[in-house]
Amino acid sequence: MGPGVYIHVPFCWGKCPYCDFYSVVPDDTVVDRYVRRTLELMPEYGGRVSTVYFGGGTPSIIGAKRLGALLEGVCKNFTLSPNAEITCEANPTGVDGDFFRELRSAGFNRLSMGMQSADLGELRLLGRRHGPDEVRRAVELARAAGFENISLDLMLALPGSSEQTLQRSIDFAAGLSPEHISAYILKIEPGTPFASRGLVLPDDDKTADQYLFTVERLGGLGYEQYEISNFSRPGYESRHNLCYWKCEEYLGLGPGAHSFYGGRRFHWERDLDGYIRGDGPTDDGPGGSMGEFAMLNLRLTRGLIEGECIARFGEEGREMFERVRKRALGCPGSLVRTAPDRVSFTPEGFLVSNALIARLTD
């Protein structure tokens, strides 16, 4: 696959009450200074990359022209694989046919849109400014502009949600025929507005039921689960996110962005002013250890594979895999699958993946 480039676009008109990503309200002058700073940084890096991902924030609100300029900077300073996957996140509101056509013309070939739910009450609770009609219209406009790879986000285990509301959202999303669907369980992050509201989330059993229902329902609709929260039609897995989960290198630019690049992990502080001013990234030490490799690969339905451990770490990789496999044999078969050459989790296992990963890799 090869390394990826992630560009964090830290601008949003307003913060959704569940969101913990770094973002600020855009101002044209500040946005232009952010773009210039990001372009200035690119020559310091370089190399061959196979994926580019613009996340946020809401990248679409800075406009297709600025996004195109940033992508042009990537193309000038990095060598992109001929079939590079180039993704832009977008909200279903504030976009039109011209935006999608300009984006496609600039070289973007994948979109990720935050649908979250097809239920208006749930959308209002989540602070979203769109309804199902806007999602349908955005997908139709993107298709007309030539996008053949679209992902939609869904959110599970919302306050007051039920299997019925979830099924309607899943069926609505699948009915738009996206190539990829991400389905995340709502978590209340410290410091977010939701954290101070005392929301009552579904209990663990109901949350598990919704997750397992989602896996089954999406599978029946042609979306194969390939990671804890991600489903796709065959061949449309998010190649950029697979960089993370396969413990491959990636460069992150923008305030709040993280990197694993040149064997090191580092991040940019969540400080737009400091980023524009020229503050450098904070070093987080070496990356790519055997423990990291095992932990990340176990997030994938394919699991941890012996041959890949050996290819990456040699004899130490073989020994590490055998330790993980031996511990996995002591776990319930309903949670962990073991074979001579791989260890993987079942959907039930993904629900307790943090505990399982700690048990297998500690």
Image: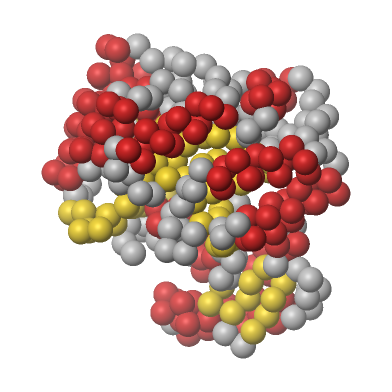
Residue furthest out toward the bottom: 340
Can residue 356 be seen in the rendering of this structure?
no
Q: Quadrant of the N terminus?
A: bottom left
Spot occupied by residue 70 in the image (x, y as percentages of width and height): 23, 34
Q: Nearer the viewer, residue 304 or 90?
A: 90
Up the image or down, 124 lies above or below 351; here it is above
Up the image or down, 55 lies above or below 239; here it is above
Query: Residue drawn at (85%, 41%), measured in percent from left and top?
Result: 203
Up the image or down, 133 lies above or below 218; here it is above
Left or right of residue 99, residue 170 in this image: right
Q: Nearer the viewer, residue 244 or 13?
A: 13
Spot occupied by residue 35 in the image (x, y as percentages of width and height): 25, 26
Query: Residue drawn at (72%, 72%), measured in percent from left and top?
Result: 336
Q: Quadrant of residue 254?
A: top left
Left or right of residue 203, residue 121 in this image: left
Q: Quadrant of the C terminus?
A: bottom right
Up the image or down, 8 lies above or below 148; here it is above
Q: Nearer the viewer, residue 36 or 114?
A: 114
Can residue 136 be seen in the rendering of this structure?
yes
Query: Residue drawn at (36%, 37%), measured in percent from left and top?
Result: 142
